[in-house]
Image (cartoon, rainbow, N blue to C red):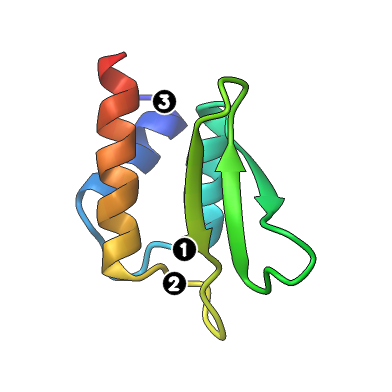
Amino acid sequence: MSTLEKEIKRLKSKPKDFTYEEAKRILNNFGYYEHNKGKTSGSRVVFTNKDNSKIELHKPHPTNILKSYQINMLIKKINEMEVL
């Protein structure tokens, strides 16, 4: 099992301590890259790929742990990508 497969399996188990960096690493492996939404975006970021598909996230702070709704949204997106 590759590192990416292990990270996806961990994400799909919906852990309470899944970090933004882990999500970023998974999305990078699927060809998504992080961009700020604009000059005044604050902690809002968007991940885009070459097909201009977008995934919007809010960088968690002060900790680096994602909220459960963000984890659920990432699982849904990854399931869609794995079907393609």
Quadrant in which the N terminus is drawn: top left
Q: Tell me how far mark 2 sits from mark 1, CA to CA.
A: 4 Å
Q: Nearer the viewer, residue 45 or 74?
A: 45
Q: Residue at x 49, y 53 (%)?
A: 56
From the image, state whether disc 1 or disc 3 is nearer to you. Answer: 1
Mark 1 touches mark 3? (CB < 8 Å): no
- Answer with left or right where residue 66 lies relative to residue 84: right
Q: Earlier in the sequence, mark 2 or mark 3?
A: 3
Above or below, 43 relative to 50: below
Q: Identify the residue under disc 3.
A: 2
Q: Describe the element under mark 3 as helix, strand or loop.
A: loop
The CA distance from mark 1 to mark 3 is: 19 Å
Q: Amino acid at mark 1?
A: Thr
Q: Disc 2 designates what residue?
A: 65
State if disc 1 and disc 2 touch (CB < 8 Å): yes
Earlier in the chain: of badge 1 and badge 3, it is: 3
The answer to whether residue 20 is left or right of residue 5 is right
Instruction: Answer above or below: position of 14 versus 76.
Output: below
Residue occupied by mark 1: 19
Q: Position of residue 34 (x, y in %)?
A: 66, 46
Q: Amino acid at mark 2?
A: Ile
